[in-house]
Amino acid sequence: MGELWHGGKIYTMEEEGGVVEAVYVENGTIVEVGAKEELEARYHPKQFVDLEEKTMLPGFVDSHMHLIGHGERLLRLDLSACTSYQEVLSLVAERVKTTKQGEWIIGEGWNENNFTDRKDVHKRDLDDLSRHHPILLKRVCRHVTLVNSYIFEKAEIMQGRKDPKGGKIGRDQHGEFTGLLYEQAQDLIAPILPDIDAAYLTKALQTAIQDCWQYGLVGGHTEDLNYYGSFQKTYSAFTEVIRNLPFKAHLLVHHEVAHEREQYENTHYIEFGAMKIFSDGSFGGRTALLSEPYEDAKETNGVAIFSHKELAELVKQAREFYMPVAIHTIGDLSLEYVIDALEMHPPKAGQRDRIIHCQLAREELIRRMKKLPAILDIQPVFVSSDFPSVIEKLGERRLRYAYAWKTLLSAGLHCAGGSDAPIEQVNPLLSIYSAVTRKSFVDENCYVPEERLTVFEAVSLFTTGSAYAIGKEESRGKIAGGYEADFTILDRDIFHVKEEEIKEINVMMTVVDGEVVYKK
């Protein structure tokens, strides 16, 4: 005997506007949907769940995030709400007062584009706060880190040192190190970073999953396996935590540890996905690789993490492991490199590659992508966070194919929606709002309105889109017979509210395999 869910607006997401009266669930699987009386007579449910006029959707799944990193952001000094550099420094100063000398102070999420006082940051400002603590502040994109002189000295990064391959050490107009480390230059301090133990990983994952639940997320496609000491230690933390906190974790596998993947089996809650590769950086750090120089920094067109040839070799390596690839690419030249590599080394039949972010394209690149067995992992909330500052970096003329979600969908490309948490807030309703309105969180203006999505298209990114991205379109992402009973229940009908209300919708309940894991 199972459960009959009824009494609300139940959207199946099989087609726009498609609703059913009731859903009958047994052992975590949807058996049938339809009229309440008919299902009740046919199955004699043991339990009835009244939705009390709330709205039920298939469970939201974030198609691109860093789950442990999200937990870390919640546990660390959060700088994401700072609107001035002085506010950042004040928060660090307060933390210095309560931290023993020699212990690390780590902050997350600063974004100079939101600062009202000054945009340039420098290690001398951190040095003024303390020369007796290692201070490390990650920019919101995580492609840039600001550290103090204590860390430079411990890591033996001496003045005059050349930039490492795929990275850059920030310098001011006098040639002095600014304390900014871009892309692979962040690896220079890796040997001195504090050890990460199993207890830390467990706490970060527990914190992250419980936070995801309150935003209606039943799962996420996450990339964490190469940053916390070892593949085995990180994977063990996932198995330990998810044993007690049901969450459908699809793990991308960083190319540096892809050879270890074959030692582990997929389970219902933890499965392995594509080989993750970084092709370039971010617009915020001006490290996204562009085909032409940045509008506001003509001396650079970004950073290629790998050369054109090296990227193709990594894709070839993935094929030797019988893996699809998931490649981070933001700039249009980087996207060109990626497409070249995917065309040169296609995946085996039935596999789907993933192009992550795809924030700047060109018309001919979109035509080429249409011929690839590839999914685009897009982050709609980037529109609200990055505009208007991205216009300064790209210029007006390149906006036609920047964050062009409608164009990509209209071209017939399959898209899935993610947050890139901890880069952005994990709440999928914020992403849906951004996709529908394209309004900036900074000035509330709508940017490139012709690229707005319908609410159905936006919700699809986090339901059917995320399922399709991992080949689960026949078992996840819809409310239909035979599908997994993953539900997100909202306090109002997302398809019949004003656009501005979308970001104010509350998640009332999150259900994984028929089990209520969160209730407001």
Image (cartoon, grey):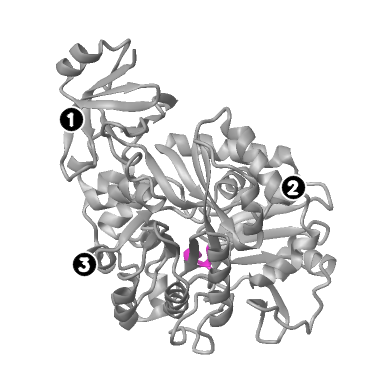
- Viewer-proximal residue, 334 or 34? 34
Q: What distance separates the C-alpha of mark 2 from that of mark 3?
A: 46 Å
**For marks 2 and 3 on the same chain, the one whose residue lies earlier in the sequence:** 2
- Amino acid carrying mark 2 in the image: Ile
Q: CA distance from mark 1 to mark 3?
A: 32 Å
Q: Is 139 on the left or on the right of 392, as rendered?
A: right
According to the picture, the residue beneath numbered tag 3 turns out to be 450
Q: Residue at x 57, y 54 (%)?
A: 79
Report the residue at 37% width, 41% height from top: 60
Quarter holding the N terminus? top left
Residue 22 located left or right of residue 355: left
Q: Which residues are magenta?
A: 111-118
Q: Residue at x 53, y 81 (%)?
A: 308
Q: Main secondary structure of the magenta part?
A: loop
Q: Is residue 192 above or below residue 163?
A: above
The amino acid on which the numbered mark 1 sits, given as a three-letter code, is Val
Give the secondary structure at mark 3.
helix
Element under label 2?
Answer: loop
**Residue 20, which numbered label?**
1
Decide which of tag 2 and tag 1 comes sooner along the chain.
Answer: 1
Q: Which mark is residue 196?
A: 2
Q: How many marks?
A: 3
